[in-house]
Structures are given as C-alpha cells and as structure tokens.
Image (spheres, rainbow, N blue to C red):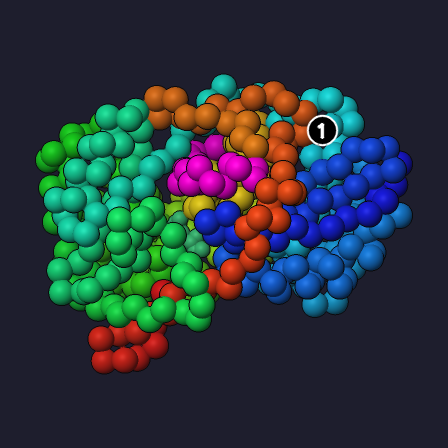
Amino acid sequence: MKISNAKVIVCCPGRNFVTLKIYTDQGVYGLGDATLNGREKAVVSYLEDYCIPALVGKDPRNIEDIWHYFYKGVYWKRGPVSMAAISAIDLALWDIKGKMLNTPLYNLIGGKSRDRILVYAHANGKNQEETIEQAQKEIEQGFKAVRLQSGIPGLDHTYGVPRDDKPYEPAQKGLPHEDYWDTSKYLNFVPGLFAKAREVLGADVHLLHDVHHRCTPIEAARLAKELEPFHLFWLEDPVSGELQDGLEIVRKHSTTPIAIGEVFNTVYDYTTLIARQLIDYVRMPVSHGGGITHLLKVAAMASVYHINTGFHGATDLSPVAMAAALHFNTAINNFGIQEYMPHQEIVHEVFTKNYWFKDGYLYIDDSPGIGIDIDEKKAQRYPYEMACLPVNRKLDGTMFYW
Ligand code: GCO
Ligand code: MG
C-alpha cells in the first residue's frame, strides 16, 4: 500500500481551517486538521513545500515510522508550525488505518474506556451578572461543567468575551486588533465572580476559569489561593507556558487544580511539569501536539503521575480534530474533561459531524477511522480570509501577553 498523493484544503466557513487530505493507491483517503489560528499559511507552506513531496510513495500503514521521519528526521524540530503539520499527517494516517480495517479510531488505540465524554461549555458575559446568567442557561441545557469568563470593570474588552452579539471567535479579519489589560483590576474582580457563581449555581456544577497566561507566578498564586474556597475544576494557564518554574510557586500556595498546555507542542514541554507534579491536566490538543501517536505518549506519561487530560477544544480546531480527540478520550484511562465550543452551523456545511451533545456529554458514532468528511465544493465557496488573534497591551501601552 502506498500514499499516492496529498493535498491541503484551506477554507473559511466563518473562520479559517486548514485540512490535509492524504490519498492512497487503494482508493482510501484520510483527513487531518492542520489549522493554526492566525498562522494558517505557514502550516500550508510547510506541508505543501516539504512534507507532501516526501509522503508520496510511503506506506501509510507505518504511522510510527512516518511520524519519526518528520520529527527525528528533521534537523529543525518542534515548534507550532512543524508540529501542526506532523499532527495533521498523523491524524490522516490513523483515519486511513481505521477505514482500511473498517473500525473506528478508538478501537485501534485500546477500545472503549467509557461511552460518553464529559465536556465543559463556555459562559461568557460582559459583566458578572451576564456571565452567571449564561452559565445558568448552559446548566439548563445539561452541561455539568462550565468555564466562566467575564468582562472586567474598568477594562473595555477582555479575552473570552464577545465584542458584539456574534458568537465568540478570538481571531479577527486583518492585522491584529489591540486589546488593553490591567492585572490588578482582573485580580480584584475574579474571586467575587466565583463567590457569586457558587452562591447562585450551587456546589455541584464544575466551574473552570482561563487566565490565558496573564499572571506572574506570585499573582497566579494569589488568584489560585483566593479561588480555593470555590472549588474550581481547574484554573487554566495561570502563568505563561514558557515559565515552567512559575507553576511551582502557584503549587506551593494553593490546592486549586492547574491545567496547562494548549500552546505546547511536544512531550518535552510537559516532562518537567508532569514529573514534578506541578499540574493536574494536560491540554495540548491532537492537532497541535503531534497527533494521536505523540499524545498517546504524553497521556501515558501523565497517567503514571495521576494527571488527567483536558484537551483544548476551541472553534479554531476543526471538526476533524474534535472527532479525533473524542476517539482519544474514549480510549484512554486518564481522560479528565474535553473543552467543547460548538462550531457555527456554517462549518458543518463543509465538514460532516459524527458526534453529538446530550446532557453534559459528547457521544461519537462508530463510523470507521476518525469519521469526518469534507465537502470540497462547498469548501471552495468559502475562500481563506486573513485573520489574526489580538495583541495585548497594558493600560500604559506596554506590550503584554494576550
Ligand atoms: C481556550 C483557549 C482559546 C484560545 C484560542 C486561540 O481555552 O479555549 O484559550 O480560547 O484563545 O484557541 O486560538
Ligand atoms: Mg485557554
């Protein structure tokens, strides 16, 4: 069996997606998600100019060897662009294997450890009241876990909150939009939001919060400590991921569980954090962290330290990545939770959907491989539109993390 060809499909049904399609000489093809929000074209070039020519002629059954060909075999290793490309190749090869063997992906990586996948919803509001009302609506829809992000008094706009009445999408058309940020206003506000949320929503619902890399270690420690009475499911990205020792300071001061890694791309971003038990959840998604092949290794290492998964699942990960994550979550033992930010309906004009939400959980059907297809004609109707994630400045103009 041989890979006969591969191509990259770029489309923008409401937001940009990059999809890799690998063809074989047996008539079976596989799909992988190569979307890197705001840097899509860099991955397209990496795939088209360097990976696809080398893929043609290889036996698609040898997934481990092909993975290492593009990882160990490349002198300039790691990094989000090359790892997004490797992830897409890996997903497409697992998709092909599942289709060839006529079995869903989860069967190839251990079978079912569970029948349904616990997910968390996003409750975003312009202020405390709106955020908690939104959370109530989601709990009424059946969600058992909700992430709260709110506008902050004194700041025009912040991460996680829609600018108008449209669904929240962080990337905006054209060059990066500039946001403004003030950590002390944020730190003064968030504990009160969660105090009120617990009062209104009760003790049972799981509550989560994303700091989006914006605190110094000691600020994050203060926040994690002040949030302790409200028993968060997790506090996400309390410090910027490159400062791994910072998590030790957070850990020393609080029992609030910590999740990190949506911007990581290899197990080496995690080895210290896992082995020193500085975190509780790994978030690196299958579409940025080397696909199924590499995430199996990360999850295995995490499991030794009783650390669970909680994969990134924002709308910039395509339905191919979401379905692949659901297979992965179905199979491994140390699954924790899955982020679920549903795509707009227009996305499913282009991508089919083999998963559905019911009463707090996602379910996936047992179609072979990953189980998602792409309608290329419809994809053509929505050509790429340049869009970028915002940049962030402190109120005095200093560049800051977004
Ligand atoms: C999350 C993330 C996203 C990112 C987005 C960037 O926890 O879902 O932080 O909202 O900001 O995926 O592309
Ligand atoms: Mg996040």
* Front one among 269 and 50: 50
Q: Quadrant of residue 269?
A: bottom right
Residue 135 lies in the magenta stretch = no
With 203 as the anchor, is 71 left or right in this view? right
Q: Residues within 10 Å of mark 1 (few under 14, many from 20)?
A: many
Q: Is residue 369 above or below residue 171?
A: above
Q: Is residue 23 above or below residue 396?
A: above
Q: Which percent across, then down, holds residue 362?
A: 44, 27
Q: Which residue is rendered at x = 48% and y = 32% of the image?
A: 335
* Front one among 121 and 216: 121
Q: Quadrant of residue 75?
A: bottom right
Residue numbers of the magenta segment: 335-351
User: Number of labelled discs?
Assistant: 1
Q: Secondary structure at mark 1?
A: helix
Q: Label 1 amino acid?
A: Gly
Q: Which residue is rendered at x = 40% and y = 61% of the image?
A: 172
Give the dominant element type of the magenta stretch: helix, strand or loop.
loop
Query: Split into 4 quadrants, where in the image is the C terminus?
Result: bottom left
Q: Which residue is rendered at x = 70% and y = 67% of the image?
A: 76
Q: Which residue is mark 1?
A: 98
